[in-house]
Structures are given as C-alpha cells and as structure tokens.
Amino acid sequence: MKTDLSGNQWFAIVNPNAGNGKGKKDWTRISTDLRNLDLNFTESFTHSKGHATILAKEAINDGFRKFICIGGDGTLNEIVNGAFEQKVCSTNELTLGLIPVGTGNDWGRMFGIPLNYEGASRIIKDGMTTPHDIGLVTYFNGKEKQERHFINIAGLGFEAVVVKRTNYQKDRGKSGNTIYFYNLLMSLLSYKNTDAEIIVDGKSSTAKIFSLNVGNGRYCGGGMRQTPLASPLDGILDVTVINGMGKLEIIRNLKILYNGKILEHSKVNGYKCRNIRVTSGSVLYVEADGESLGHTPAEFSIIPSAINIVYGTKLIP
C-alpha cells in the first residue's frame, strides 16, 4: 500500500558493509546526526549485492521520492539503477543525497560533500538540489546483452581489470584506497593493449587501447582524474582513451592519472560526445561506478537531467 509522505520523508538505504563495515558500525552516529537536524526518514539495510536496487524500487512503489545513500559509489549506483527499473514515476521526480561511508567516495568529491557524518547530514538538511545527468552502458555477458546505468564514470580495458581485482579483494574483507593502487600496479604485469574500433557520435576510428574511460563525473579510483573536465550537468559524456602505452611508460606517467593533466599526453585522446560504441577482436571488460560488469561490444550514452541530486559546498560547471 502506498504511503502519503507529503514530500518530506526520506528513505535511507544503508550498506552495512560499506567502508569495510563502517556502514553498520557508524549507523547510530549517522542516524543521530540526521535526527538532530529534524530530518524525517525511514531506513533499510542492504543484505547482499544488488539489494539497494530492490530497496529503491520498493520504496518508490511505496511513495518515497527522496533517498539518502549511506554507503559508497557502488551503493549509489545500485540506487540509481533501482530508480530506472521502477515504472511508477519519472526519474526526474526523484532526489538523491549521499552520506559517504565507502572507500573511494569519488562522486561526492565533485560536489563538496564532506566525509564527516555531521557535515554530510547538514548538506541533506540544507537541501540544495540540481538536475544530474545519468549514463547508460550496454554490454554483453557471454551472448546475453545487458545494460546498466551509471552516475559517475564507466570504463573498459585496463581500468575494468583493476576494478575486477579490487572488488574480488573487497568481497573478502579488504578495503582502503591503497588496495586500488596496489591492484593497478599488479595488473600492469599481465595486461596487454587491445585493438578496437571506436565510434564516437557516428565517426569511426581504430586504436590500440590501454584503457577507455567514459566520464559523467570527474573522479574514480579514490581520487584519480581520468576525465578531468567532465560535468554531470551538461548533457555530454567526456571520453579519455589511453592508446598503446607500454608498462614502463604507464608507471612513469602515473602522476597524470591524478593531477588532471592526462589529456595533455601525446598518447591520450579526449572526446566529448553523446554516444560512443566500442568493439574489439579480443574481449575488453567493462565496469561502471566501480562495479564489474561484462565485456565488449559495449555502447555508452547519456540521459540529460535524469535525476535530482543534493549537492554540497560546490556545484561544478
């Protein structure tokens, strides 16, 4: 039965495993901060991977339109996908806020959402909102074509291999930003560049891909800036393609992954587009918002102003 919520009730989706268990351990502190600010909310805890998607769909069916994610970028991604899977209302009727509890927290970094719970709760209370674009990636698992929405950054190639290794370790209780960097270095030992065709808004080219990142947002991997000029407010995707770099060259240039100057490198191409398709002779794995998906062929597109988000101390251009 649907509930009359009068637009004031938040639905908080809590990932107890986020941040290596901080979601569960710190929920009492977080909920106290929210109540001290007179925020009305109903909470529900996730129990497994993908559960936040189910909870979001059920909450929308019950009448909720405002959501707080207590977790990391992966939990945020699941809530967004729940928003798009439901058929009750348009996604632009929904509002999404974040209290960061994950390890990377790259999406919140763009909007000045603080890592301390009291500050992040205050952002929810202040309620400054803006429409936010959402990305869509279609890909394959074996012969089955699938799709996934993403709020921040998707990618394929080397990035997806690092994500896959990192998620494997997270599932076994390891956490922290250093794990991502460690897996980045370890993945270099066996990774090979892959020949691919890239079609950007209908224009085709070929490349020997090391990695390809599709940015709706600017940060990934705990602060890496692989799409440093991306904005989730402009209706456009930013694409960064690293072409044919060898292992030693990558190691020598690791700093450009973090300092925002990646597009200045001679072996890096940058594009702004609304659609990009990638096919490859050998499999290139795909990830979105740090979640391992399937493989090529893959297609990325943008849905402008698809959902409302609560932002903090800055609103990026």
Image: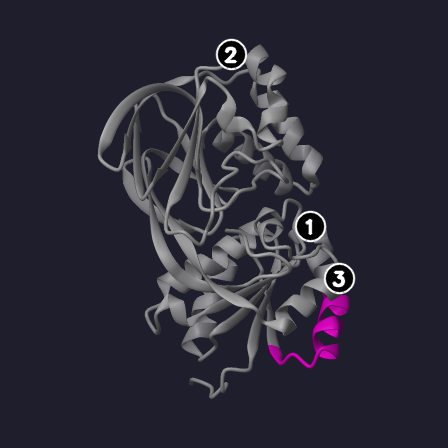
x 57%, y 64%: residue: 97
Give how far apart the Cα atoms at labels 3 and 2 are: 43 Å
| Depth order, front residue of 25/156 | 156
275 left or right of 305?
left
Say whether marks 3 and 2 touch (CB < 8 Å).
no
**Figure coloring:** one colour
Amino acid on which the number 3 mark rests in the picture: Asp
- Judged from the image, the secondary structure of the residue bearing numbered disc 3 is loop
| Depth order, front residue of 33/166 | 33
Vertical placement of residue 127 versus 100, above or below: below
Amino acid on which the number 1 mark rests in the picture: Gly
Q: Position of residue 303 (x, y in %)?
A: 34, 54
Instruction: Pick the quarter of the image with the N terminus.
Output: bottom left
Give how far apart the Cα atoms at labels 1 and 2 are: 33 Å
Residue 19: which numbered mark, if any? 1
Comparing labels 1 and 2, the label whose residue is closer to the camera? 2
- Judged from the image, the secondary structure of the residue bearing numbered disc 1 is helix
Q: Position of residue 304 (x, y in %)?
A: 36, 56
> What residue range appears in magenta?
26-41
Q: Position of residue 86 (x, y in %)?
A: 36, 67
Q: Which residue is mark 2?
A: 246
Residue 26: which numbered mark, if any? 3
- Judged from the image, the secondary structure of the residue bearing numbered disc 2 is loop
Q: Is residue 182 visible?
A: yes
Instruction: Check residue 175 for magenta coloring.
Output: no
Q: Of the residues under marks 3 and 1, which one precedes in the sequence?
A: 1
Instruction: Tell me the quarter of the picture where residue 252 sits.
Output: top right
Instruction: Tell me the quarter of the picture where residue 113 sits.
Output: bottom right
22 left or right of 110?
right
